[in-house]
Image (tube, rainbow, N blue to C red):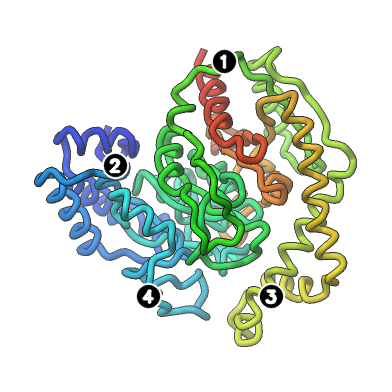
Amino acid sequence: MTMTELSATEANGKIRGGEITSEELVGACLERIGQIDGEIGAWAHLDPDYALEQARARDAERQRGAAQGPLHGIPVGIKDIIDTADFPTEYGTPLHSGRTPSADATLVARLRQAGAVILGKTVTTELAVYSPGKTANPHNTAHTPGGSSSGSAAAVAAAMVPLALGTQTNGSVIRPASFCGVFGFKPTHGLISRAGVLKQSPPLDTVGVFARSLDDIALISEVLMAFDARDPDMRPRSRPKLSETLAEAPPVEPRLAFVRTPVWDQAAESTKDAMRELIEHLGEHVEVISLPTQFNDAHEAHHQIMNADLAMSFTAEYDGGEGVMSTVLREMIENGQKVLATEYNTALARVGEFNKVLDAIFAQYDAILTPSAPGEAPKGLETTGSPAFCTIWTLCGTPALNLPVLVGAQGLPLGVQLVSQKYDDARLFRTARWILESLEK
């Protein structure tokens, strides 16, 4: 195993034990980036000297016996819609070329407090919507890595960095995690601060993370899940004990519900076959259920909320972006401009109705199993693939994990999405580990 293939948890242990230094780890990541990123294009902004300067500072702290945070010396990639005081944050569009924030986003400050090294900024789609950036899928560069957190997913999958941050307003964490074959986590809406993060749609916007192990996802997520009054959707509450719960055996073996959502007909046949095999393997622990027909309107409710909010959030970009903004984003904004206030508020009210139904399902089952995406990563870099299998869970604010456990007909990764009740993030991790261990038997 090369140094860049170490998980963050493994690297953390080796740094604490003096087996490697942060400078060596960061240097290895930078060397790996230099070797392969010309083909993959995961990074928007890098400053190798500054990254190594941070790493040497972490090593000096360790040598003098200073307190070490849970991510001490570990490099992290930051999606380029998240403010960083020492790197540009350009939102994936020429409209914000050269934009340099004066302060870190709250979650970047949390990472620094935990001892992390900010390695650089990863590529995002245009304003974190649909129009792709330069990133290709590391498994086959003729295929999309997904979006909008394309660079973060690709960088982790290609072992350029052990951890990276993304965001999801529809399917922008779970979908690229599926396409790139890594773990991706979208927590309960409101558990990670979005202060200093590009605003698209406040009822939907959620910060997420990527890693190559479930332990790493828990490690970085716990660091980020701290109350921040600057985010109006956050409430003071105890942090979920993700790592502690992840290490526990379930008190009883989990009951899982396999859900065919209203977009099941969009799933590729190879996806349907793979999910059938998974259900057969898990046997009596899985029951196939259907969502009530009222969820047939969920995607439309999501689109009304998202498009209307895009029209509000990106007014300045729309007004000044003629000839620069992509056609697809202009059309979404124009659709959003036509959404009536009554339609928007009705769509928001539906979210509570949907969650009441989900609460009844989660009273019987530990988690829901469903595909992360319709299939493998589509061929071509002009698309980021469909987020349809993520839409309901983002709308409802439920936590979701991509488990990179399947392979499709073309030999590309195929993710399984595991969803649980709002604020039940810790049990979601424990259930995910049980599934992973069951698949190894």
Image location (x, y in percent) of residue 195:
50, 64
Along the horizontal axis of the image, is 310 left or right of 361?
A: left
Q: Secondary structure at mark 2?
A: helix
First in residue order: circle 4 vs circle 1: 4
Q: What is the number of the mark on residue 4?
A: 2
Q: In the figure, residue 108 lies in which quadrant? A: bottom left
Q: What is the number of the mark on residue 435?
A: none
Q: Residue at position x 25%, y 47% from top?
A: 73
Q: Nearer the viewer, mark 2 or mark 4?
A: 4
Q: Is residue 305 above or below residue 378?
A: below
Q: Secondary structure at mark 4?
A: loop
- Find disc 3 in the rendering and name its residue: 312
Q: Nearer the viewer, residue 260 or 340?
A: 340
Q: Are marks 2 and 4 in contact (CB under 8 Å)?
A: no
Image location (x, y in percent) of residue 326:
63, 74
Spot the residue most to the front. Answer: 236
Mark 1 neighbour density, 10 Å: few (under 14) some (14–19) many (20 or more): few
Q: Is residue 236 visible?
A: yes
Q: Are marks 2 and 3 in contact (CB under 8 Å)?
A: no
Along the horizontal axis of the image, is 110 left or right of 242?
A: left
First in residue order: circle 4 vs circle 3: 4
First in residue order: circle 1 vs circle 2: 2
Mark 4 neighbour density, 10 Å: few (under 14) some (14–19) many (20 or more): few
Q: Nearer the viewer, mark 3 or mark 1?
A: 1
Q: What is the number of the mark on residue 251?
A: 1
- Find disc 4 in the rendering and name its residue: 102
Q: CA distance from mark 3 to mark 1?
A: 47 Å
Residue type of the residue flagged with mark 3: Met
